[in-house]
């Protein structure tokens, strides 16, 4: 009799518990999802990040210069309601301010400053060094990431993870400089990005914000067309960088990381 009563009690408690848990409990709510904002998300490594975080169920804010032309990104977003597309040219102060205003009050766990350009290589040789081209490369690779980080800092501080990741390159490393001069505008703009973000990491450390510089290694994207070297696929590079970002924390802030988790010399 006692055994029968406890079986009834157990069944009742299971029913009660089941009625308290919503049917779609596995699905995180809009507020529960971690959020990532990615710049230059329409192709290359940026699109790779969108696919990776999108498939992990994160809320992804994929920004690009021209959403109307971002067909591959739009296709992915159509299949993944957790991915939204917003316009951002990172060299534009007004577009950055408009984005920050549109996202006012929304937490961003992870900001990935991915957009980048080498500039036109033909304008980077002696006798043809084009200063307007250099200014544009700096605007995209150096000033842009800092402006975006500053504009979205309140959002990042409102997020749980509080991380800002900047795509740098081993081409920016003084310690690894070998071989002939090449793409000086690109290389120096990324060296400047490194020093900027090293400082920014120190400036925002007391707010609990982690600032990282990551070298993705040579990856098979439009940027590397005709580079004549062995290139990793976007999926393989992103597949290594995403777990690295997961793992790095405030103690690792202000450092320059290789995609495989080793430090890159400045
Ligand atoms: N691929 C590599 O081997 C490699 C190695 C080291 C570092 N990186 C770094 O990784 C990042 C991604 O490179 P990737 O290889 O994916 O290059 P990519 O294929 O050339 O793509 C560059 C991305 O940046 C965007 N972009 C350029 N200027 C922009 C601007 N003013 N505002 C917003 N977006 C802009 C492009 O958008 P549009 O389509 O509108 O031009 C595109 O989405 C870059 O920061 C790059 O320096 C790449």
Image (cartoon, rainbow, N blue to C red):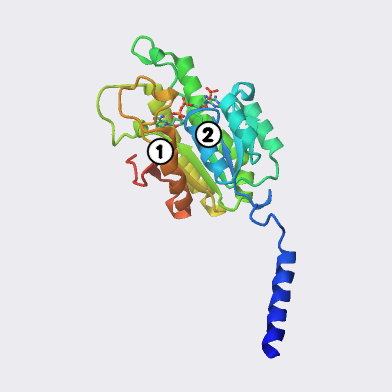
Numbered circle sitting on residue 236: 1
Q: Is residue 136 above or below residue 45?
A: above
Q: Dot 1 lies on which element?
A: helix
Residue in view at x 54 percent, y 54 percent: 206
Q: Dot 2 lies on which element?
A: helix
Residue in view at x 64 percent, y 33 percent: 78
Q: Percent from the top left, x then y, of residue 93?
A: 62, 28
Q: Quadrant of residue 180?
A: top left
Q: Quadrant of residue 64?
A: top right
Q: Is residue 198 visible?
A: no
Q: Percent from the top left, x then y, of residue 84?
A: 65, 36
Q: Is residue 216 above or below residue 251?
A: above
Question: Mark 2 packing: few (<14 Cα in 10 Å), some, or many (20+)?
Answer: many
Q: Percent from the top left, x then y, of residue 216?
A: 40, 36
Query: Disc 1 and disc 2: Cα gap in Å?
Result: 24 Å
Q: Hey, which residue is sitting farthest left in the picture?
A: 179
Numbered circle sitting on residue 136: none
Report whether 133 appears left or right of 3.
left
Report whether 85 appears left or right of 179.
right
Q: Nearer the viewer, residue 19 or 142?
A: 19
The residue that label 2 is drawn on is: 145
The mark that comes first in sequence, 1 or 2, is 2
* Ligand 1 within 8 angstroms of badge 2 C-beta: no
Q: Percent from the top left, x then y, of residue 48?
A: 49, 35
Q: Is residue 77 above or below residue 207?
A: above
Question: Mark 1 packing: few (<14 Cα in 10 Å), some, or many (20+)?
Answer: few
Residue in view at x 55 percent, y 31 percent: 41
């Amino acid at each position: 009799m006692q055994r029968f009563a406890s079986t009834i009690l157990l069944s009742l408690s299971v029913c009660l518990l089941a009625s308290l848990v919503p049917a779609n409990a596995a699905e995180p709510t809009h507020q529960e999802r971690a959020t990532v904002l990615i710049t230059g998300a329409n192709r290359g490594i940026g699109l790779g990040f969108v696919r990776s975080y999108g498939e992990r169920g994160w809320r992804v804010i994929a920004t690009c210069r021209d959403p109307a032309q971002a067909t591959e990104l739009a296709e992915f977003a159509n299949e993944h309601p957790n991915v939204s597309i917003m316009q951002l040219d990172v060299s534009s102060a007004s577009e950055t301010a408009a984005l920050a205003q549109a996202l006012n009050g929304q937490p961003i766990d992870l900001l990935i400053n991915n957009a980048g350009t080498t500039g036109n290589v033909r304008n980077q040789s002696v006798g043809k060094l084009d200063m307007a081209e250099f200014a544009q490369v700096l605007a995209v690779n150096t000033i842009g990431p800092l402006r975006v980080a500053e504009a979205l800092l309140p959002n990042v501080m409102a997020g749980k993870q509080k991380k800002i990741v900047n795509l740098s390159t081993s081409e920016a490393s003084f310690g690894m400089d070998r071989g002939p001069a090449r793409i000086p505008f690109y290389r120096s703009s990324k060296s400047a990005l490194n020093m900027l973000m090293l400082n920014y990491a120190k400036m925002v450390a007391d707010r609990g914000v982690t600032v990282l510089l990551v070298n993705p290694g040579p990856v098979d994207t439009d940027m590397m067309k005709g580079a004549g070297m062995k290139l990793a696929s976007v999926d393989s590079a992103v597949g290594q960088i995403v777990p690295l970002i997961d793992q790095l924390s405030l103690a690792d802030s202000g450092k320059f990381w290789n995609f495989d988790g080793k430090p890159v010399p400045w």
